Image (cartoon, helix red, strand yellow):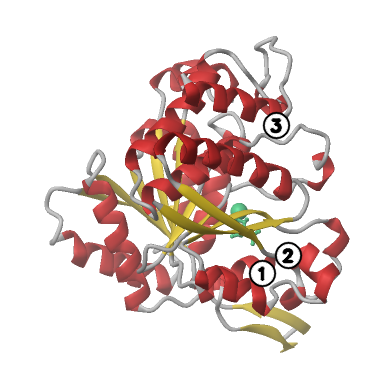
């Protein structure tokens, strides 16, 4: 089969990790007889430098015309001084919004091979964990009304959190369906003791629970969730939450896997077209040094195979190759830890994964 992929490499380590993921896709294509036709588009800081805006129309059109988008990361200190609506991050937010990608799936699991890198207590790490965070991606405080005004204490800035019933309903549906295919446990995370949006969120989740009697639902306040994630992450299966809570908790979840360099994500909407990206940032401090771990992006490409292209076997094979390489003791700089392994560069790690795919 043939697939058109829009590559949005972005800034910092973005280009190197996307190039590595493309090499893995090419190998999958060779083995299974698929053609992945990739075309690169600018977004983020590089787009600001090249054409004065973070998300050129050509990029939007290219992504809309593609079967799916693979994104590296955007941003860096060079563009930090810019106003909010022309910052590199705006490109990412706009892309999510124009592509209608309201669902963000962020799986986090502890690889047995990396147990020693898990910062949690040995007895907790021993239990392992495997959770799927379902983060709402195109609503909430990220997209609410904002601005500057004269307040009680003088000039102030404000951002607002708003959620419609429709937005809550559609993300909750994805979460229930996801739980149904896994261990049938859903934790809905909110701040219903304080926020009206959370109380509405909770009400809708409870209403919808009636349609999924096979799924056990628990509500959890976000502050408690932040604590439970480090106390005993094995209690979670599927987690559903708002845009901002999901942003924060997914970084926390990544750290307990050993490294943020391991976590992929899929952003999905109502069509097969998705956007796939590592959950980490552009790490400008290590760009070009070979230290960037390509695994999160390679696993994001595997999610693309699974969710956008329905290539389950191919996705399984990529994930198994990553497992095999980690089990064999190969490490990038971020996951060397106490293993004593000498770190591979991102390119070398990719070579190992491709070798494992060939076995
Ligand atoms: C993420 C990132 C983005 C977000 C930033 C770069 C806008 O942190 O994908 O988690 O907050 O969504
Ligand atoms: Mg984030």
User: Helix, strand or loop at disc 3?
Assistant: helix
Q: Which SS class for mark 2?
A: loop
- Residue 133 vertical position relative to residue 353 in the rendered view, above or below: below
Percent across and percent down for residue 227 are 49, 40
In this view, the residue farthest toward the top is: 340
Query: Is residue 114 something that shows in the picture?
Result: no
Marks 1 and 2, how far apart at CA: 6 Å
Q: How crowded is mark 1: few (under 14 residues within 10 Å), some or many (20 or more)?
A: many
Q: Which mark is residue 91?
A: 1
The residue that mark 2 highlights is 44
Which residue: 49% across, 72% down?
A: 99
Residue ID for mark 3: 346
Return the x and y of residue 257 as percentages of the image width and height. 53, 31
Task: Characterize the local packing of mark 3: few (<14), some (14-19) or many (20 or more) Cα atoms within 10 angstroms.
Answer: many
Point out residue 31 in the picture as x, y percentages from the top left corner.
44, 34
Quarter of the figure with residue 22: top right
Q: How far apart are marks 2 and 3 (CA)?
A: 22 Å
Mark closer to the observer (2, 3): 3
Tag nearer the camera, 1 or 3: 3
C-alpha gap between disc 1 and disc 3? 26 Å
323 vs 107, nearest the viewer = 323
Neighbours of disc 2 within 10 Å: few (<14), some (14-19), many (20+): many
Q: Which residue is found at the position 27% from the left and 68% from the top?
A: 203
């Amino acid at each position: 089969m043939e697939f058109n992929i829009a590559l949005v490499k972005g800034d910092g380590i973005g280009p190197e990790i996307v190039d590595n993921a493309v090499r893995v896709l090419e190998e999958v294509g060779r083995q299974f007889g698929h053609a992945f036709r990739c075309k690169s588009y600018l977004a983020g800081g590089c787009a600001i430098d090249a054409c004065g805006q973070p998300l050129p129309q050509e990029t939007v059109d290219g992504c809309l015309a593609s079967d799916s988008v693979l994104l590296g990361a955007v941003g860096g200190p060079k563009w930090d001084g810019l106003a909010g609506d022309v910052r590199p991050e705006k490109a990412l937010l706009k892309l999510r919004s124009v592509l209608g990608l309201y669902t963000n799936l962020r799986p986090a699991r502890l690889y047995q091979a990396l147990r020693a890198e898990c910062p949690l207590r040995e007895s907790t790490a021993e239990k392992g964990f495997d959770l799927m965070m379902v983060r709402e991606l195109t609503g909430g405080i990220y997209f609410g009304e904002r601005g500057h005004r004269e307040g009680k204490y003088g000039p102030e800035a404000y951002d607002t959190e708003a959620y419609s019933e429709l937005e809550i309903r559609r993300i909750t549906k994805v979460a229930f369906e996801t739980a149904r295919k896994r261990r049938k446990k859903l934790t809905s995370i909110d701040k219903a003791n304080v926020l009206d949006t959370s109380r509405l969120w909770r009400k809708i989740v409870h209403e919808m629970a009636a349609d999924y009697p096979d799924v056990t639902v628990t509500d959890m306040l976000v502050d408690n969730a932040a604590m439970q994630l480090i106390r005993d992450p094995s209690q979670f299966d599927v987690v559903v939450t708002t845009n901002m809570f999901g942003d924060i908790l997914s970084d926390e979840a990544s750290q307990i896997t050993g490294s943020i360099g391991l976590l992929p994500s899929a952003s999905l909407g109502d069509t097969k077209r998705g956007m796939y990206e590592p959950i980490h940032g552009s790490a400008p401090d290590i760009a070009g040094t070979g230290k960037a771990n390509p695994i999160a992006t390679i696993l994001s490409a595997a999610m693309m195979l699974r969710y956008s292209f329905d290539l389950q076997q191919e996705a399984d094979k990529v994930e198994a190759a990553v497992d095999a390489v980690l089990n064999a003791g190969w490490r990038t700089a971020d996951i060397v830890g106490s293993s004593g392994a000498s770190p591979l560069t991102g390119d070398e790690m990719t070579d190992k994964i491709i070798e494992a795919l060939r076995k």
